[in-house]
Amino acid sequence: MREETKAELDALFKQKFSYLKERRIDPRVTKFASHLVFLEQFASVQNQIIRPMMDKFGRYLEAMGHRYFIGSVQDLDDGHINPTGRITMHILLNANTEKLSRVTPSLSFRIDETNVVCLYKRIGVPTLSCAPVGHYDLQAITSNIVESHLKEFIIEAVLQD
């Protein structure tokens, strides 16, 4: 076989099998990989912006006689295709309260399946879930945005009757 023929066939085989490989990639795998990257980016924003601001407001609440709890989750959502990322601040309105309940005020930043950060707030309504009250692109999550939502949350949860 001549070198030119071999080179031509090699190129055709490479093109053919490369095309087949690309066709075999399940779109869910690509979506999953995209979510994993977004989850990593969310974790960075959570650790650098959201949690430090929640801690500052939490220490302020403690000085005012209330307790707080901050919980976060970054996982693969029990093996489902959409990774989960969430950070939530709970306010225990009575310093003697030891556990969270369905009426414990909470403010959460969560990612959704479209790679958007959703803001959830629960105040005084006994429920296990709530609807989002805001949506942000990850790049829009700044210290000012987080501070503004935490201030509003504390006013509604602690200071309003």
Image: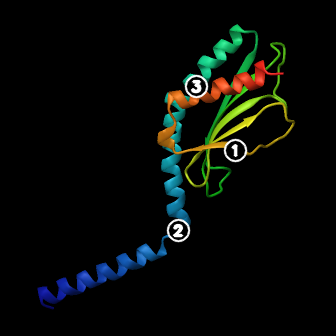
Q: Please, which residue is most extreme toward the right here?
A: 126
Give x and y (percent) for residue 106.
Answer: 74, 31
Q: Label 2 is placed on what type of residue?
A: Pro
Helix, strand or loop under label 2: helix
Q: Residues within 10 Å of mark 1 (few under 14, many from 20)?
A: some
Q: Label 3 is placed on what type of residue?
A: Glu
Give x and y (percent) for residue 21.
Answer: 42, 74
Give x and y (percent) for residue 62.
Answer: 70, 12
Helix, strand or loop under label 1: strand
Q: Label 1 is placed on what type of residue?
A: Pro
Quarter occupied by the N terminus: bottom left
Q: Residues within 10 Å of mark 2 (few under 14, many from 20)?
A: few
Residues at marks 3 and 1 touching, judged by CB atoms closer than 8 Å: no
Q: Please, which residue is most extreme toward the bottom here?
A: 1
Residues at marks 2 and 3 touching, judged by CB atoms closer than 8 Å: no
Report whether 10 appears left or right of 92: left
- Residue at left 23%, top 87%? 9
Q: Which residue in the structure is indicated by mark 3?
A: 147
Spatial separation of the CA atoms under disc 3 and disc 1: 18 Å
- Residue at left 36%, top 79%? 17
Pick the residue in front: 121 or 10. Answer: 121
Q: Which residue in the structure is indicated by mark 2?
A: 27
Q: Is residue 75 above or below residue 154?
A: below
Give x and y (percent) for residue 78.
Answer: 68, 51
In the image, which is nearer the foreground, mark 2 or mark 3? 3
Report whether 51 appears left or right of 94: left
Q: Where residue 87 is drawn, which disc sits there?
A: none
Pick the residue in front: 87 or 18. Answer: 87
Report whether 124 appears left or right of 108: right
Point out the tag, 2 or 3, that comes first from the N-terminus: 2
Helix, strand or loop under label 3: helix
Q: Which residue in the structure is indicated by mark 1?
A: 132
